[in-house]
Image (cartoon, helix red, strand yellow):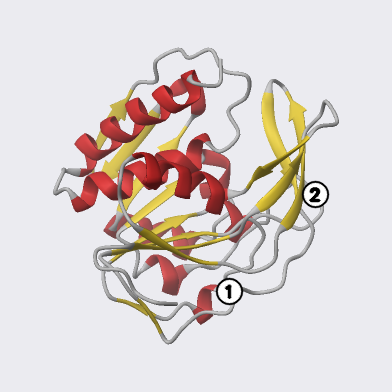
Amino acid sequence: MVAIDNAITVVSTRARDHLPDGSIMEGGPAHYIGTALDRLGHPWELITGQVAPVHVALYGGEEHYVIPSLEPIALPPTLPGPATILSPIMREIPPEAVPATEGLLLLDLQGFVRRPSTPELGKDVDLTALLARADAVKASPAELAALDSASRRMLDHTVVLVTGGERGTVVRHRGREWRVAAQPVRAHHSIGAGDMYLGAFAVALLRRQEPCEAAEFAARFTERMLAERA
């Protein structure tokens, strides 16, 4: 990988999403984070592995993902750039194998706590060492609940973005909490919304915005991107 000045390093997976209507489209967090960074004009470099088949199912009006086991992504000795985003979809980033980072470290919890070939999440997942290094963590309430107690305690030392879809996002930082409301958007689907959100949040942090301001920026950006799917 040839480093680009100021480029965000994205460690993630591209996917082929098999939708409930039988159609197949390009997806995965590598695709959607990259889409967000491209739209915001911020350079980025991707470290990835195999293209993953993902089956998208609808339960209770929400999208759930069934993903097979994936081979680990090969990582360099150091993750360069002002920020690194780790966004696995099925444990393809072994937490103990994550090398040192030159800049901020942002995690999407989703793929660290999922179980292969089922929409169910794991239980008592130990990410203590990795979370101790993180500058920001994005997760749903269910993903947070999949962590063991020691890992959840590590979250007290970082920015936590608790995402709730149409319910908005709760930002937790240094013992304080802010709620960022979601604005209604008509869109064909919301696949990749969280990935675009995390990419925009990373850019806002690098622009020296406070976490609550960065979360607001990311929410409004993601809504604009989703509105283009109407």
Q: Which mark, residue 102? A: none
**Residue at coordinates 60% horizontally, 56% vertically from top-left?**
111
Q: Which amino acid is tagged 1?
A: Pro
- Looking at this rendering, what residue extends furthest in the bottom direction? 77
- Looking at this rendering, what residue extends furthest in the right direction? 22
Q: Is residue 48 above or below residue 121?
A: below
Q: Where's the N terminus, which quadrant?
A: bottom left
**At numbered mark 1, what does the secondary structure look like: helix, strand or loop?**
loop
The quadrant in which residue 209 appears is top left
Mark 2 to mark 1: distance in Å?
Answer: 19 Å
Q: Is residue 118 above or below residue 188?
A: below
**Residue at coordinates 31% horizontally, 69% vertically from top-left?**
4
Along the polypeptide, which appears first: circle 2 or circle 1? Answer: 1
Measuring from the top left, give residue 159's x and y in whole percent. Answer: 29, 50
Q: Which amino acid is tagged 2?
A: Thr
The quadrant in which residue 63 appears is top right
Residue at label 2?
A: 118
Measuring from the top left, give residue 172's x and y in whole percent. Answer: 29, 42
State how many labels appear: 2
Q: Is residue 150 visible?
A: yes
**Residue at coordinates 77% horizontally, 33% vertically from top-left?**
19
Residue at label 1?
A: 94
Q: Where's the C terminus, which quadrant?
A: top right
Give the crowd class for mark 2: few <14, some 14-19, many >=20 residues within 10 Å.
few
Q: Is residue 74 above or below residue 145?
A: below
**At numbered mark 2, what does the secondary structure look like: helix, strand or loop?**
loop
Measuring from the top left, give residue 65's x and y in whole percent. Answer: 72, 42
Q: Is residue 145 visible?
A: no
**Residue at coordinates 49% horizontally, 39% vertically from top-left?**
194
